[in-house]
Image (cartoon, grey):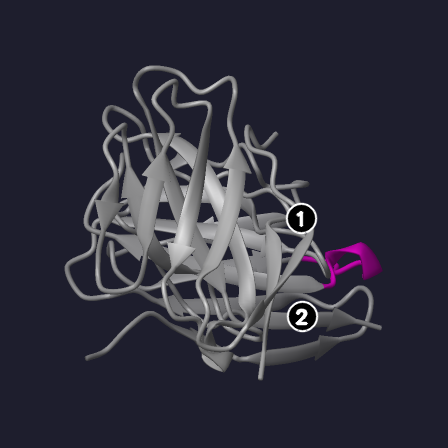
Amino acid sequence: DAKTTQPTSMDCAEGRAANLPCNHSTISGNEYVYWYRQIHSQGPQYIIHGLKNNETNEMASLIITEDRKSSTLILPHATLRDTAVYYCIVRVARGSQGNLIFGKGTKLSVKP
Amino acid sequence: GAGVSQSPRYKVAKRGQDVALRCDPISGHVSLFWYQQALGQGPEFLTYFQNEAQLDKSGLPSDRFFAERPEGSVSTLKIQRTQQEDSAVYLCASSLGGGGYEQYFGPGTRLTVT
């Protein structure tokens, strides 16, 4: 079973920041937080991952709380093309085969 | 650049038929994963290959499901005697290795069993 809890759906206005929360209260010390998204009729796409420090790349920022029990994915300027289901996943990064355990994710709708 | 490709993109099978779904991973990727995604759900793990070795098939739902990757590149997922509950999108992903490497997904094959 997925070790994360996410809201079922969220709306965001185009051009505004989209903040997607995720709870992972049972995360272990060697588990990372990964985010993937799935645009309609496509396969999932990697966005970002982190252990305990905040991370930023060209797609998004990841903010992880100090106790690591929750995190937020931030899309700084959402566009219509960011409409997708966003999955928050915790996984061990080393010493495992690496298969992903998906929950139901958050369906983000970006509206004009 | 070439990503993960899957064929066919859509497959309609009559109940009881056998089907074969193909995955072409990114060249050089050691790890290959198959996932099954039911409508409205997240993908669920089926099986994992490291090169040609199938190291984990714990997610395969029944012995009607069989996967192979004989030369450590292309993989085929075969479903024998398809049932209606097999209707789903079948996703293939590849990565440089196991562990925390980023997985690259193909577009999936949508299987409909009538």
Which residue in the protein does label 2 denote?
B111
Q: Percent x, y for residue A65?
A: 38, 28
Question: In the rendered view of the protein, which quadrant contains the C terminus of chain B?
Answer: bottom right
Q: Residue furthest bottom?
A: A112
* Residue span colored magenta: B80-87
Q: Percent x, y for residue A75?
A: 39, 61
Q: Percent x, y for residue A57?
A: 21, 57
Compared with A72, B109 (above or below) is below
Which residue in the protein does label 1 denote?
B64
Mark toward the start of the polypeptide (1 vs 2): 1
What chain is tagged by disc 1?
Answer: B
Compared with A32, A107 (above or below) is below
Give, as a three-letter code, the residue at label 1: Arg
Query: Which of the two discs, 1 and 2, sits closer to the camera?
Result: 2
Compared with B85, A54 (above or below) is above
Marks 1 and 2: same chain? yes
Real-space Cα separation, disc 1 to disc 2, in angstroms: 15 Å
Residue located at (46% from left, 23% from top): A69
Residue located at (38% from left, 70% from top): A77
| Residue B51 makes an appearance in the image | no
Left or right of A29? Residue A4 is right
Compared with A104, B109 (above or below) is below
| Residue A4 makes an appearance in the image | yes
Left or right of B30? Residue A110 is right
Q: Nearer the viewer, residue A9 or A29?
A: A9
Q: Percent x, y for residue B47?
A: 47, 43
